Image (cartoon, coloured by chain):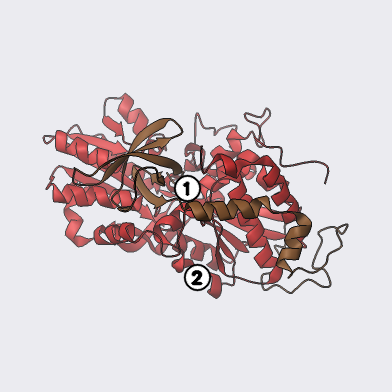
Chain colours: A brown, B red
Amino acid sequence: MCLGIPGKVVEINDEGPLRMARVDFGGVRKEACLAYLPEVVLGDYVIVHVGFAISQLDEEEAHKTLEMLRAIDAEGMAMELGALPEVDRTAEVTGPLPDAPPSQAPPAPEAPV
Amino acid sequence: MKYIDEYRDAEIAHKLVDEIHRITTRPWSLMEVCGGQTHTLVKQGIDEALPKGVRMIHGPGCPVCVTPLEQIDKALVIAARPDVIFTSYGDMLRVPGSTTDLLSLKARGADVRIVYSPLDAVGIAAANPERQVVFFAIGFETTAPANAMAVAQAARLRLDNFSVLVSHVLVPPAMTAILESPTCQVQAFLAAGHVCAVMGWTEYEPIAERYHVPIVVTGFEPLDLLEGILMAIRQLEEGRAVVENQYARAVKREGNRAAQETVLRVFEVGERTWRGIGTIPDSGYHLRPEFATFDAEARFDVGDIHTQEHPACIAGGILQGTKTPLDCAAYGVLCSPQKPLGAPMVSAEGVCSAYHAAGRGLAAPTAFPLYDLARVDR
């Protein structure tokens, strides 16, 4: 029920009481109500939940996220963030390191370490 | 498919896993709120690829699972009436009530119909004026705009044979209830991306601040989840606790205003009982008084029905994140997707069905992770 997936708007019908569309999900076409996304036009991608488009995909944001993900490199990311302490990579994850900033949240006592 | 395939790139997934390992210096417990996210995590083996000590606690975000037994029993009483066409999302049909389920009732001759959209139920009501059409309006904030619009349309069409059995729940009060619990182990949340697509994330800002808990609005694809986990752990490691948005392509801070307006025109916030968790104040929607004529509970006089869960089922602990399906004696033995005891095994978003589909704790696996994220060479 929360598993909405993105689809492309391929038909829009403004004639009825509610703005409706045909949305293509990789070849499967379903009807969706556009009442909550009045500005959507043909070719836009929307996320549909139980027959209602609730969100329009933002191409620019999607591009930015992907570019950032593709740029991830263990060293590069550390440089970019610049806020991380140098850590001994060989160390086991057993507890706070001397240089690690303190955290307010207590560690889970029974987490297997 | 666009906006899906690129977020399943195995190479980037491995880089993200490496980065999570690199920045993690101590054990952390994170909760993914939404059942859809649970399924991706378990199916892809993402939770098993995380550093030792980093634990994903599965949240209560499965609408089918948290719908109380009482509501299902009310649905069964209404659906058994000969004058009723009972309509529901498909997920609800096999959820066991006290004595039977909607699908069995249908097999015995009740007119139970699966609808894809609640507007279909309104259409059935318009086409069958001599019958009473009831829609089982369940779900989180993601289905509320659709369910609200169905009621608004029925009112506009003056349909006097349409009503809704409402069992709507809200995510932020459930997160607060989890954080207030004395046994709470959650240190950061991955918030449900599509709930936030509707409601935005302003409701989560006071929670992050008050409980000093990082909250990352997260999508549903493997890369979304990995990035969400990375962002949450980074906050934990740095001692920060704010709301961040991983799912920027689909979620804006203010959410979908048009949807929120219709939801709050039809529904008002009130107390709700959550299956396995109990009663939480201000945790769900009820019809506003001006739409009371569409309330199926009043129309069919289904009073408070008292019910009991199957004694072997530990759904309550699972929904609160204190237990996993592997702690359950019935899991895979007495309880399977074919013969479920509790709702988390029925629903496509339930934790038990996610574990079962991935073959966790079973003699023979029923599915394999799509990507081999859990590499052994660490």
Q: Count all numbered tags in the image, as a single digit.
A: 2
Q: Which mark is residue B348?
A: none
Nearest to the observer: residue B186 or residue A18: A18
Residue A60 in picture, x, y percent from top left: 51, 54
Frontmost residue, B240 versus B349: B240
Q: Are marks 1 and 2 on the same chain?
A: yes
Residue drawn 66% across and 35% down? B369
Q: Quadrant of residue B39?
A: top right
Of badges 1 and 2, nearer the viewer stands 2
Q: Which of the chains bears the disc numbered 2?
A: B
Q: Residues within 10 Å of mark 1 (few under 14, many from 20)?
A: many
Question: Circle 1 sits on which residue?
Answer: B62
Callout 2: few (<14), some (14-19), or many (20+) C-alpha neighbours within 10 Å? some
Say which label, 1 or 2, has the lower sequence index: 1
Q: CA distance from mark 1 to mark 2?
A: 23 Å
> What SS does tag 1 mark?
loop
> Residue A56, image x and y in percent?
41, 51
Q: Residue at x 75, y 51 (%)?
A: B18
Give residue B306's position: percent from left, percent from top.
Answer: 35, 49
Q: Considering the numbered disc 2 on the image, is that residue within a helix, a strand or a loop?
A: helix
> Of the residues shown, which amino acid type is indicated by label 2?
Glu
Q: Nearer the viewer, residue B361 or B155?
A: B155
The residue at the point 78 percent across, 71 percent down is A100
In the displayed structure image, the side of residue A88 where residue B158 appears, left or right = left
Q: Which residue is mark 2?
A: B205
Q: Residue at x 61, y 45 (%)?
A: B222
Amino acid type, mark 1: Cys
